[in-house]
Amino acid sequence: MTRKKKRLYLLLLCGLGLGSATALTLTAFQDNLVFFRSPSDIVREAPGPERAFRLGGLVETGSLSRSTEAGRPLARFVVTDGAAQVPVAFGGVLPDLFREGQGVVTLGKLGRDGVFMASEVLARHDETYMPPDVADALKRSGHWNPNQGAAPPASSWNTLQPGRGGG
Amino acid sequence: MSNAPSLAARPAASLHRFANPGRFLRLSGRVLPWLAGAAVLVLAVGLPWALLFSPPDWQQGETVRIMYLHVPMAWLAMGGYAGLAVGSAMALVWRHPLADLAARELSPVGAAVTALCLATGSLWGKPMWGAWWVWDARLTSVLVLFFLWLGHAALVRAFDDPERGARMGAILALVGALNLPVVKFSVDWWNTLHQPASLTRVNAPALHVDILYPLLTCTLGLTLAFAAVVLLRVRAAVMERRIRALQMAAARRAEAPPMVGAES
Amino acid sequence: MSLHWWHVAISYALVLGGFAALTATAVLRHAQAKRVLARLETRKRPA
């Protein structure tokens, strides 16, 4: 065995060892790497009212109501992951992207009445990008209602040109 | 000796042809003007397209234009690091002197690109998510990538003996390569604030062609510019090494004048 | 100019400025090395 070959095998062996060590560590810490918890997680195992955590999911369609309490805007909405729902109350300005059917991550504490009191609301956006006229065309044709969920499969619209050719 | 050519020897033989510094300088000198010209040309098309002529996004509006820079920076940060890891493996196994120099010149540029990725991402996240920074798995792993680039750049320069520094840097680059799949798959393995929204659907990324084409053009242009800058730095480093060798030879001659004809 | 356009403009300025700075330092360093090397090699030849 030449010295070069020996170095190559040594390197491969080290890579294998380090790789499996990292994979094991990441699997072990899986729970700690989670940025937010879903409503199903909360229903299964509710954290105490003293613990702040992040709750993430979709804003349920038709659940948003805005009001003003003591001069501050108050928003109430329901966060859902399809299987479970958690009502949320947030006093503050919602981000621009916030709307029904959109992903959100909220930071706060779960009250004794089961309402999640959020101190911070972050909007998530999905990986679809399309011009406004394409989105309008999809909505008009009834293929997609953004309040109901994500866009239809990309192959059905990503070459659509409603602005050209008199569409 | 076995008559089958050794696995390690074959690529090494062809690689070492490019290790000749004179040959490298001649070859890269011929490639560089084309590379730089192509980068300027592609960016002259791609940047105005991305900034002015592409449509806004239906929900993100004009802010989506940050994507045309943020995404190429992220790809370059990761692709460049993959290149650093491959070069480091070659440097460790085959002791290729040019691989050491290339790794040394690559890491500061890679660190700069990763910093730009983080900065543009922050500028994008504030108006869209409502936060400059969050500690989710994607953002944190890219920050780790930035520290790996910086660490490599510092480590290879930290030793008096450049060969020792290069070896330490190569080991760091290979260990750090473990972070690459973490960056790539962080949005699939864990829930993150960063898209894709795994809660709604796990699907192929979906971009309209009017947004996809300027993105691909900007990516190509910035990749060419990245390659041109790195190549220029490697050329400068090769010449600087030759300058040091000449100066040392001159100093030795000055110390011992009668030894002129001796081995250099 | 709206806040969103400010964020876009700053992003483009950062990336273009960053690449311009990288290119400028590399060009200067390359030119310097080339000059010194040319001087050393012409001095060596007649010796």
Image: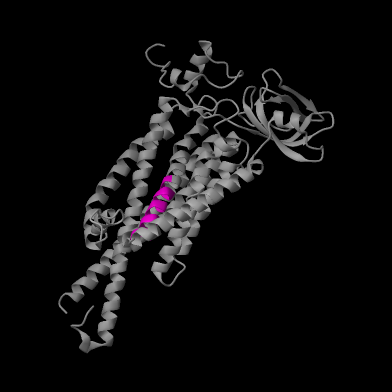
A31 or B218: which is nearer to us? Answer: A31
Q: Is residue A11 visible?
A: yes
Relative to residue C35, is residue B116 depicted above or below? above
Residue at the spot x=65%, y=30% of the render? A104
* Residue located farthest toward the bottom when viewing the structure as drawn: B258
In the picture, which quadrant includes the C terminus of chain B? bottom left
Q: How is the image coloured?
A: one colour
Q: Could you say where residue C27 lies in the image, as x and y percent from the top left? A: 33, 57
B51 or B112: which is nearer to us? Answer: B112
Q: Could you say where residue B195 lies in the image, as x and y percent from the top left? A: 55, 33
Q: Could you say where residue A78 lies in the image, as x and y percent from the top left? A: 72, 24
Q: Could you say where residue B248 lies in the image, as x and y percent from the top left? A: 30, 77
Apparent side of residue A47 relative to residue B264 in the rendered image (left or right): right
* Residue located farthest toward the right when viewing the structure as drawn: A112
Magenta residues, as a range?
Answer: B79-94
Quadrant of the image occupied by residue B13? bottom left
In the picture, which quadrant includes the N terminus of chain B? bottom left
Quadrant of the image occupied by residue A102? top right
What type of secondary structure mainly makes up the magenta span?
A: helix
